[in-house]
Image: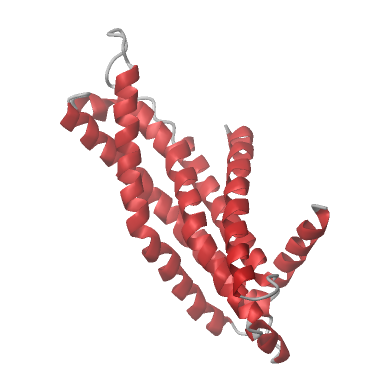
Amino acid sequence: MIFHPFGKYILLLKAVFRRPEKWSIYRREIFREMDSIGVGSLWIISIISVFLGAVTTVQTAFQLVSDLIPKSVIGGIVRDSSILELSPTISAIVLAGKVGSSVSSQIGTMRVTEQIDALEIMGINSPGYLILPKIIGAVVTIPLLVIISIALSIFGGYLAGTLSGAVTPADFVNGLKSGFVPFTFTVSMVKSVIFAFIITTVSAYQGFYTEGGSLEVGIASTRAVVISCIMILVADYITAQLLL
């Protein structure tokens, strides 16, 4: 029965976006989440992005067996692949494992140790207090991480292409400049915002409705990562279908 958990998910979102009791408390939590999600994930996104660009360049150069195709095409392929697919989607899947599991286990632990019940007894909107700062922090920082990922992916492709001799620096730069459609960057940013929302809300849902003990918290974290990755791929297809 998919409708029952989906209904609980919608009701949870309704409670999350209820008007906060005190914005000053939420503001502090939002900045803390932005630091945790954004700064805390910067190193892994940077490493992955550089190697994604490098691998894309090497594989594209390997497949260009015809002398009739100019080498500058490599730069254009790396650029469009990084902007439209590699950076937003791969970064989101990586963050689903890192951020999603953390969000789910954090909230799930609070549930099984009855800390959420204590918040509700004090009259605090626990879904809003626990989940809303995470959503805002992710929606703000993950698009910034994707922008950094795009730049590093293109840089990694440039390094791999020029150092291996697959393409000259001038040809790669010409490929980057030729035929660029600015709307592709808009599509990438739309994807990153949607992915950020999916990662935080799905993971928070799994943690918020955890029942049992520490074993169930681990199961909820695993389920959060799996469902988030599936939803990211589905959303990726739908967004591409609608916008491109």
Q: Is residue 154 left or right of residue 168?
A: right
Q: Which residue is found at the position 37% from the left and 65% from the top?
A: 39
Residue placed at 61% from the left, 85% from the top?
A: 22
Residue 176 visible somewhere in the drawing: no
Q: In this rendering, is residue 203 above or below 15?
A: above
Classify residue 37 as left or right of residue 206.
Answer: left
- Quarter of the image for residue 55 reads top left
Q: Position of residue 188 (x, y in %)?
A: 49, 43
Quadrant assignment for the C terminus: top right
Q: Vertically, is 87 above or below 202?
A: above
Q: Residue furthest bottom?
A: 122
In the orientation shown, which residue stands out farthest toward the front?
Answer: 215
Residue 64 visible? The answer is yes
Mark count: 0
Q: How is the image coloured?
A: secondary structure
Question: Measured from the top left, where is residue 3 in percent x and y?
Answer: 82, 54
Instruction: Give how far across and how far down residue 97 sits, in percent.
Output: 50, 56
Q: Is residue 107 left or right of residue 40?
A: right
Rendering coords of residue 133 (x, y %): 55, 72
Residue 105, by quadrant, is: bottom right
Q: Is residue 112 above or below residue 219?
A: below
Which residue: 55% across, 73% down?
A: 106
